[in-house]
Image (cartoon, grey):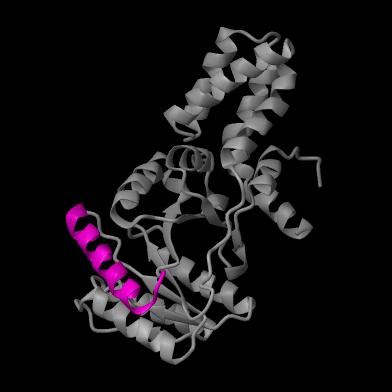
Amino acid sequence: MAGFFSKLKDKLTKTREGFVDKVEQIFSRTGKIDEELYEELEDILIQADVGVNTSLELVEKLRQAVKERKLSDPEMLREVMQEQIREILGEQSSLNFAPSGPTVYLIVGVNGVGKTTTIGKLAKNLQNQNKSVLLAAGDTFRAAAIDQLEIWGQRVGVDVIKQAEGADPAAVAFDAVKAAKSRKIDVLLIDTAGRLHNKINLMKELSKIKKVIEREIEGAPHEVLLVLDATTGQNALQQVKLFQEAADVTGIVLTKLDGTAKGGVILGIQNESQIPVKLIGVGETADDLKPFDPEEFAQALFARNEEG
């Protein structure tokens, strides 16, 4: 894992520069811990897309720690801040698997967040764990979504269950579950439409798909994974709220962490939604989609440039 830590540290450079480095500059520049320092810190956290509520909470916890530990040197706040961030990130949460029969993951998220790409990468990762995988093209709203999933299926050598554009997504899910059971597939990944112009339709559609799956496999879907694009920052928090209502999300996949200074949004997501981030994407290849390890993430975020 040392290799991935080094890679993660490298990939989080933009977030570190836009967030942690600025925080550390305040700590090293200011001679004392005062109200001005707290206000400046609050501004940086909000600008880093940590979220207003989480930013205020972090600063308040910092105040308490300063009082309790009788701290006077701002340089000592670096360690306290890292502790608090580690605390907010919570415990590592792994993907759930069915005790027997096919495991079913429903993949949700708005269009353009890298949902289909994430499905393809996840399929490859599962194959690397010696699991057989099947894909279902449940986003029947866009022909491009079906085509894109088929390209990924070919790339990783996995079959795709599909119907024509405009077909009932629940019917696709039904066919896919039947196929997964008859072929004794380990994991079925079901893509879903990402349109948000009508929340009621989205909720009805996802509810219908879930009912079909539940009827065929007890306890399924075993995960409802919400794919979020880290580069959207605060917008990601809004998407979490919406999909939480519509789909009973069980886990989050945060993509494109390598290309953004807005990686601080992961703190707001973990703190305000209480839905665990289960996977993070830090690059283009299938190997760049990894289980989220909060300890490792916090260390990589605060790693000094000279550290290996």
Q: Is residue 183 above or below residue 102?
A: below
In this picture, residue 73 sits left or right of residue 228: right
Identify the residue shown where x is 39% and y is 73%: 218
Question: Does any portion of residue 260 appear in the rendered image?
Answer: yes
Identify the residue shown where x is 20% and y is 79%: 167
Camera-side residue: 304 or 266? 266
Identify the residue shown where x is 39% and y is 55%: 249
In this picture, residue 1 sits left or right of residue 175: right
Residue that sits furthest to the bottom in the current view: 182
Residue 242: x and y in percent read 30, 48
Residue 278: x and y in percent read 54, 56
Residue segment shown in magenta:
197-219
Residue 142: x and y in percent read 26, 71
Q: Magenta region, mostly helix, strand or loop?
A: helix
Task: Judge whether residue 282 is colored magenta.
Answer: no
Camera-side residue: 284 or 42? 42
Question: Does any portion of residue 161 appear in the rendered image?
Answer: no
Identify the residue shown where x is 74% and y is 53%: 6
Q: Is residue 275 above or below residue 164?
A: above
Number of callouts in the render? 0
Camera-side residue: 211 or 79? 211
Residue 87: x and y in percent read 62, 36
Quadrant showing the N terminus: bottom right
Task: Judge whether residue 210 is colored magenta.
Answer: yes
